[in-house]
Amino acid sequence: MPTPHGSRGGMAFSADELRVLRRALAAALQPTTPTPEDVQECLRLAEAVDEASREGGRLRTFLLAELARYRAALPGSAAGYLERLRGALDTGYVPGPDDLAALRHLRDEPCGAVEARRRAGMLRRCEHVAELDVRARLAARLPARIPAPARPRLLALPGGRNDADERKPRPQPAKPESDPKRKVPTPAEIWPKRRREAPQVPPGPPPPPEEQHERATG
């Protein structure tokens, strides 16, 4: 029967089981009519794989429970806790808040230089795994972005203006043509000069009576 193998939960097959597995794969690649013995062997192999999967689940549950017991006994169980935590990470375990808090507490505890690097490295690894898990769950919850539809081009209505009309140069008003034979009036002709009139001198005072008499008798 296949059994969990190694810290990653792999399965180890016996020689007979590998032989049956090869024959099943060959039959899948080159379909042939199986014999009754082949069918029975494939069914037994499928049952063994199912049982090994169940056994792997039970083993995983046991390891996680053992990890929780070592975590509860910290800091005295630091060595055993770190070892079991590493094995759980190798099988796909995602550390929770309790693990992160325990690792931060261990990092702050006084210890040798080698042990301090070991604890700090395990903390960094767990924080990275937890961050990747959070991002994956958020990405699964967010709906897929739908690209915005392209903006439709507005069509010009009959009698209206469109982009082509806007780009066309507007016609300039025609300038009046000048007649070369026509004489251009001078400013003096347009604004004639006014005739100068003699300034009127206001009359002076009348002469005395003696001078008036002399003028009259002359």
Image: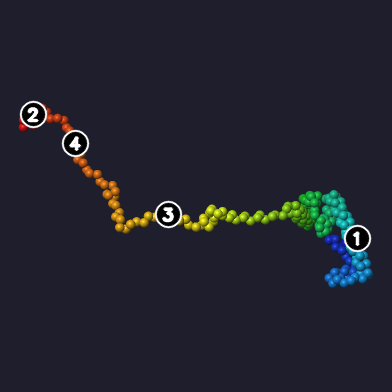
Q: Where is residue 133 in the image (x, y as percent from the top left)?
A: 77, 54
Q: Earlier in the sequence, mark 3 or mark 1?
A: 1
Q: What residue type is labelled 3?
A: Pro
The image quarter containing residue 179 is bottom left
Spatial separation of the CA atoms under disc 3 and disc 1 = 96 Å
Disc 3 versus disc 2: nearer the observer: 3
Q: Residue at x 45, y 56 (%)?
A: 171
Question: In this rendering, does residue 33 appear at all?
Answer: yes
Contact, mark 4 vs mark 3 (Cβ under 8 Å): no
Q: Where is residue 57 in the image (x, y as percent from the top left)?
A: 87, 57
Nearer to the camera, 195 or 101: 195
Is 89 on the left-hand or right-hand side of 172? right
Q: Residue at x 20, y 39 (%)?
A: 199
Q: What residue type is labelled 2?
A: His
Which residue is denoted by mark 4 in the rendering?
A: 201
Q: How crowded is mark 3: few (under 14 residues within 10 Å), some or many (20 or more)?
A: few
